[in-house]
Image: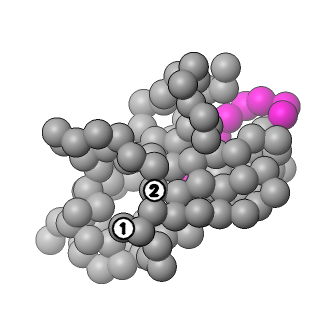
Amino acid sequence: QVQFVESGGGLVQPGGSLTLSCAAPVSFFRRLNVGWYRQAPGQERDRVALISNGGGSDYSDSVKGRFIISRDNAKNTVYLQMNELKPEDTAVYYCNLEYYDRNPWGQGTQVTVSS
């Protein structure tokens, strides 16, 4: 199992930016494909971005062109840079493996976009 710890959330105005971080203290971190997921109240948890162990990335249509996922394997950390934030981006953000069926979820980090 890989336990991720998310941080960096907060309150931001519409149009603003925020960068989230996700760390996992495992020696094989560089081999992992890692995704950022989010869950808004009353909604299912959905993946918004994925970064492969080779550095390739993929985004949901709802965030494409606004969010950027990156990783620093030396720090065992994946980042999510969120730009042009909208109220509908409000959610708890989590990171986890691409295939997370048997991997635990962390506590997540709350992002609230509001004026």
Name the residue at 73% across, 31% down. 25
Looking at the image, can residue 81 be seen?
no
Query: Residue 17: within the magenta?
Result: no
Name the residue at 39% across, 46% down. 46
How many labels, in total?
Answer: 2
Name the residue at 72% across, 53% down. 52
Amino acid carrying mark 1 in the image: Ser
Q: Which residue is mark 1?
A: 62
Determine whether 12 is above or below 77 in the image: below
The secondary structure making up most of the magenta span is: loop
Binning the other alpha carbons within 10 Å of mark 2 as few (below 14), some (14 to 19) or many (20 upward) gives: many
In the rendered image, residue 31, in percent from the top left (x then y), is placed at 82, 41
| Depth order, front residue of 91/33 | 33
In the rendered image, residue 87, in percent from the top left (x then y), is placed at 21, 66
| Range of residues picked out in magenta | 21-28
In the rendered image, residue 103, in percent from the top left (x then y), is placed at 58, 23
Left or right: 35 in relation to 77: left
Per the rendering, the mark at residue 48 is 2
SS at mark 1 in the image = loop
